[in-house]
Amino acid sequence: MRVMISCGEPSGDLYAAALAGEILRLDPSATITGFGGDRLAAAGATLVENFSGLSVTGLLEVVRLLPRTYATYRRLVADAEASRPDVFVAIDFPDFNFVLARALKKRGIPIVYYISPQLWAWRAGRMKTMRRLADKVLVIFPFEEPIYKDAGVPVEWVGHPLFDVQPSLDPREAFLARHGLDPARPVLALLPGSRANELREILPDVATAAALVRAQLPDVQLVLARAPHLRDELLQPLGALPDVVTVEGQTDDVLAAADAAIVASGTVTVQAALHECPMVVVYRLSPLTYRVGRPFVHVDTYAMVNLIAGRRVVLELIQDEFTPAAVAGEALRLLTDREHAARVKTDLREVRQKLGGPGASRRAADAVLSLAGARYTG
């Protein structure tokens, strides 16, 4: 069995690796190739191209990368023509994966879209494209399944793969002690994003907010969950904030140990929910990107935990509302108002329950191999 997988950013790489691992457990003779990152490669896939440096947000940033992006696309199509995969699995990253899937569909390769893009949230017209392209869409949130069914798209809810990739956690006291932190003092986690352009827009105000929190709550301990492969110069805004403990590659441990967190909108908000870590969610795009994209957005909330809950269970501060004072105010409330923090934790527990349980990656692998096998039995 030959499987090609394409993902274009760190969260997709995490899910792709879990999927690849389950495919190989179900069929040890399978070969997996594609476009991804270090995790997918470590899981046993042969990368045609590594996405390092291609994961960005914003119109101008995407335009600058077009030559390399097109070269990557050409390499993947050429590899598919040579190896003839039995199935192609696209994981999120729609602007690239839609184009690649279209090319592979024309060559008779079945298409599975896993971790489907949020078509219900913005640019809903792409649902027609999905209906034309995908032989099967595997969604991770329960509310997505009826949306795709109503649009006539073959769909299956498999659950959220974050349950499958959660590492074994150190006890809170041991984790904090190893990093020189006092378990008796409050811990505020900072998770400002994993992309370079995200950090440029977000980290300066997160650092200022953290300083405001420390001014009001001097015994607070600040922990930065640093995404892998970030250049040191991107973290310069933290230079004016002494005694920030930086932890790389242990996001789950940081969230499990923290009393509250300042979190960039994205998959990490779901990770925080799994650990019932109260959070304030922030995000900012370049003004041009925001002005161009805003008319295409069809939801009133951005944070994934709020979308899953169906209401605002955590405060989200987007674009102009994202100010250091507003962020600090909510972070202080989460750290000092026990009743408020308890309410948020209860709501996050509800979000966790709505995500299902472990096994999403195995169910997704079953669906992928079943579709691939249909080429021979159907």
Image (spheres, rainbow, N blue to C red):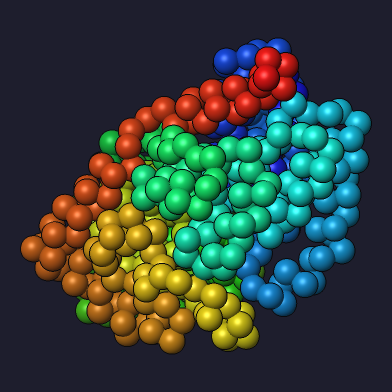
- Tell me which corner region of the image, top left, top right, bottom left or bottom right, holds residue 37: top right
187 vs 300, nearest the viewer? 300
What's the residue at 85%, 58% (across, down)?
Answer: 70
Residue 196 seen from this side: no
Q: Quadrant of the C terminus?
A: top right
Q: Position of residue 45 (x, y in %)?
A: 71, 29
Task: Please say if 286 is above or below 267.
Answer: below
- Tell me which corner region of the image, top left, top right, bottom left or bottom right, holds residue 61: bottom right
Q: Position of residue 245 (x, y in %)?
A: 42, 58
What's the residue at 59%, 65% (across, down)?
Answer: 125
Task: Please say if 314 is above or below 49.
Answer: below
256 vs 299, nearest the viewer? 299
Q: Position of residue 133 (x, y in %)?
A: 68, 47
- Tell me which corner region of the image, top left, top right, bottom left or bottom right, holds residue 64: bottom right
In the image, taking residue 73 as reference, residue 113 lies left or right, namely: left
286 vs 302, nearest the viewer? 302
Q: Quadrant of the N terminus?
A: top right
Q: How many marks can you see?
A: 0
Residue 129 seen from this side: yes
In the image, taking residue 277 as reference, residue 375 lies left or right, namely: right
Q: Position of residue 151 (x, y in %)?
A: 50, 52
Task: Please say if 287 is above or below 183.
Answer: below
In the image, taking residue 247 as reference, residue 57 lies left or right, namely: right
What's the residue at 36%, 45% (across, down)?
Answer: 142
Farthest residue, direction left? 339
What's the residue at 68%, 75% (across, down)?
Answer: 59
